[in-house]
Image (cartoon, rainbow, N blue to C red):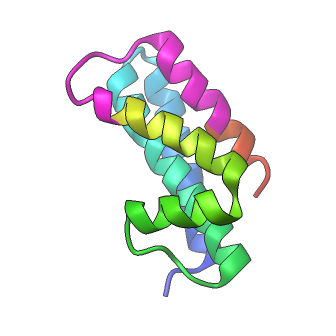
Amino acid sequence: MVSLDELRINAKEYLEDADYLFNKSHYNSALNLYFKALVAICDYIILHGTGKLPRNHTERFRILQEKYPDIYIIVDFHFNNYRKAYLMRATKDWVEVLRNDVHKLYSQL
């Protein structure tokens, strides 16, 4: 089973790598890693609060919506943008919003 420490370490690594890519103006790659960090943070919060890890995005979103609605709103918004990035280039402004949200949530771990 994944531990809280492993999830925190993964989130930190994704976040550091995303920041590096963001600062190099590699916005699509940074967006992918920021979203991975967001998922790791959510999994940390869920595991800490419920003792269980979600099996997939659907279960994760359901748990967040039921137990952590403020976080759900953030994740839902960014998930839609994350999916858009498959088809289009992410802009600095777009990724910066995700970056700020992820940093804010990470600081609460």
Asked where in the image residue 79 lies, by quadrant, the reply is top left
Could you tell me what secondary structure mostly forms the magenta stretch?
A: helix
- Count of numbered labels shown in the rendering: 0
Residue 8 visible? The answer is no
Residue closer to the observer: 30 or 52: 52
47 relative position to 88: left or right: right
For the point 68% across and 52% down, the residue is: 69
Q: Quadrant of the C terminus?
A: bottom right
Q: Given the current orientation, which residue lies at the most extreme left position?
A: 87
Q: Residue furthest bottom?
A: 1
Residue 81 is situated, as x and y percent measured from the top left of the image, at 40, 29
Residue sitting nearer the eye, 62 or 20: 62
Where is residue 89 shown, x and y percent of the image? 28, 16
Q: Position of residue 85 (x, y in %)?
A: 30, 27
Which residue sits at x=56%, y=20%?
96
**Displayed quadrant of residue 63:** bottom right
Q: Is residue 94 magenta?
A: yes
Range of magenta residues: 83-101
Q: Give the answer, above or below, for where 102 lies relative to 60.
A: above
Q: Spot the residue most to the front.
A: 66
Can residue 69 be seen in the rendering of this structure?
Answer: yes
- Would you place residue 97 above or below residue 38 in this image? above
* Residue found 60% across the figure and 39% down from its top: 74
* Residue drawn at the location 49% of the way across and 35% of the way down: 78
Residue 27 on image: x %, y %: 39, 21
Q: Is residue 23 magenta?
A: no
Position of 9 relative to 27 (above/below): below
Residue extending furthest toward the right: 108
In the displayed structure image, the side of residue 92 where residue 46 appears, left or right: right
